[in-house]
Amino acid sequence: MTEDEVRARAFAMPIHSPAYPSGPYRFVDREYLIISYRTDPERLRALVPAPLELAEPVVKFEFIKMPDSTGFGDYTESGQVIPVRLKGESGGYVLSMYLDDHPPIAAGRELWGFPKKLGRPELRVHADTLMGTLDYSDFRVATGSMGFKHRTLDADAVAASLGAPNYLLKILPHVDGTPRVCEIVRYRMTEIRIRGAWSGPGALDLHAHALAPVADLPVLEILSAVHIVADLTLPLGSVVHDYLTR
C-alpha cells in the first residue's frame, strides 16, 4: 500500500476493514422516549464546558431505539442531554450516551465526539406503558416510563425540536496522552419526517454507579415525557470551538 493509498483510504480504523462506513447516516423508524426533568443547577454548571452556557437547570433523559440505520444496523442507546446556548443560539449539550452496538460507538466517538460507552439500554411497550431501561453491565442505572400515547403532539413543533443544534466535546489523545484534538463540535439532524409524536405521564428512576454516573444529576421534578417515531438523517458535523487554538 503506497502512502497516497493510505491517505485516500484513511477514513476509519482498521484501514483494511473499517468499523463503520462513511456518512451521512439515515435512520428509519427511530423511536424516542424523552423524559425532561429539573435538576440541581450547580451540578449542571460543573459539567457544561465553556464556551457553552447553561440555558436552564433541565436534563433530557433519552431512550432511543434505532431498528434501521445506515451501516450501524439495529441498536438502542440511552443518555442525557442538557439545554445550552452558544453565541445566543439554543441547543443541547450531549453529556452521556450508552449503547449496545460497536459500529455506532466507534463512529460516534471518532467522527463527531459523541460521549459513547458500552451499555445495555432497552425501549419497548409493556401493556399500557412505554418503558425505557439502561443497564451498565448487569446493574440497572435508569428506568423511565410513560403512559402510552395519551396525547398527540404537533408534528411541526416536534420536527423543529429534533432539528435543533446539538453540541459535543470531542477529545482525541496524542500518542503521549496529551490532547491532540479538543474541540466543541456542532451537528443537527436533517431530512426529518415525523411518523408520530405523543406525550403522557412520565417517571424516571436513577441509581448511582461509579462508571455510569447518570444519577449525579438527580431528578427533582418531572417536567414532560414524550414519545416520538421519526425518520431522519445524521450528517457530519462542524467545529465551532477549538481549545488548542489560542
Image: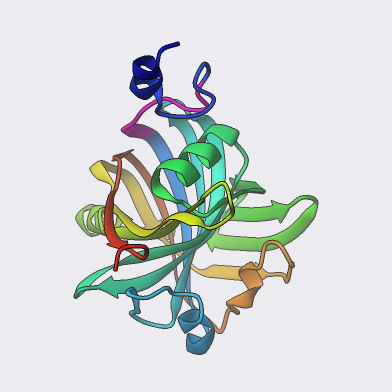
Q: Is residue 140 left or right of residue 5?
A: right
Q: How is the image coloured?
A: rainbow
List the single residue furthest toward the right.
138
Q: How many numbered discs, if any?
A: 0
- The quadrant in which residue 4 appears is top left
Question: Residue 77, how many percent across, how many down?
Answer: 55, 47
Question: Residue 204, how many percent across, how many down?
Answer: 60, 69
Q: Is residue 26 magenta?
A: yes
Q: Is residue 63 left or right of residue 2?
A: right
Residue at 36% of width from left, 63% of height from top? 244
Residue at 62% of width from left, 46% of height from top? 122
Q: Using the rendered image of the protein, determine whether residue 153 is visible from the camera's viewpoint.
A: no
Which region shows up in magenta?
18-27
List the single residue furthest toward the top.
1
Question: Residue 126, how many percent across, how many down?
Answer: 63, 49
Q: Is residue 138 above or below residue 25?
A: below
Front residue of this view, candidates 29 and 172 = 172
Q: Is residue 22 above or below residue 131?
A: above
Q: Using the rendered image of the protein, determine whether residue 105 is visible from the camera's viewpoint.
A: yes
Question: Residue 64, how many percent across, how many down?
Answer: 50, 48
What type of secondary structure mainly makes up the magenta span? Answer: loop
Front residue of this view, candidates 200 and 156 = 156
Looking at the rendered image, the quarter that the C terminus falls into is: bottom left
Residue at 50% of width from left, 69% of height from top? 201
Q: Is residue 207 above or below residue 121?
A: below
- The quadrant in which residue 1 appears is top left
Q: Is residue 45 magenta?
A: no
- The quadrant in which residue 83 appears is bottom left
Residue at 66% of width from left, 68% of height from top? 213
